[in-house]
Image (cartoon, rainbow, N blue to C red):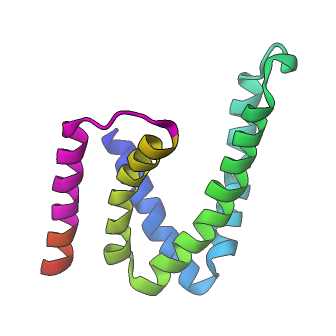
Amino acid sequence: MVVAILVCGLGYAEGATLSRRLGGWQVISWSLLLSLPLMALIGLAYLPTSWGNIHVSSWIGLGYVSIFSMLIGFIFWYRGLAMGGIASVGQLQLLQPFFGLLLAAFLLHEPIAWTMLASTFIVVLCVAGAKHFS
């Protein structure tokens, strides 16, 4: 997990640096193109035995994640990192899981435990403190 956090952090920082020169859509397009061979091999290794068991909602979810989360979302994310600075804007992503929890609670009626609220409060305090002292 620590290695994944480090690699993703370096990827964000490098992507933001490159987006200042190339632009956000070029950076994510190149990233996706360069990762395509490895992702294609992994995809081939895990091909389903029957395509008929895959529901339409699964295809819609895959399309959403592919187009909006991995392409369009990163265009705006890299643009924001390039404009606002990697260190300051990058801290905002720490709040993303909590927005996901809130959406799951409101849209899917998932229960919110007090531990979720406590951890949200702690992370918000850490982000606010880091912004205040930077």
Residue 110 in magenta stretch:
yes
Q: Which residue is pictured at 49% across the width and 78% down the height?
A: 80
In this view, which residue lies farthest toward the top? 49
| Left/right of residue 72 with respect to residue 47 in the rendered view | left
Residue 59 location in percent, x, y? 78, 36
Give the residues in magenta.
108-127
| Left/right of residue 74 with respect to residue 114 in the rendered view | right
Residue 17 sits above or below residue 126 on the image:
below
Residue 109 location in percent, x, y? 45, 36
Q: Quadrant of residue 105?
A: top left
Q: How many marks?
A: 0
**Residue sitting nearer the eye, 5 or 80:** 80
Quarter of the image containing the N terminus?
Answer: top left
Q: Which residue is pictured at 35% across the width and 67% down the height?
A: 92
Residue 121 location in percent, x, y? 19, 55
| Left/right of residue 49 with respect to residue 97 in the rendered view | right
Residue 31 sits above or below residue 130 on the image:
above
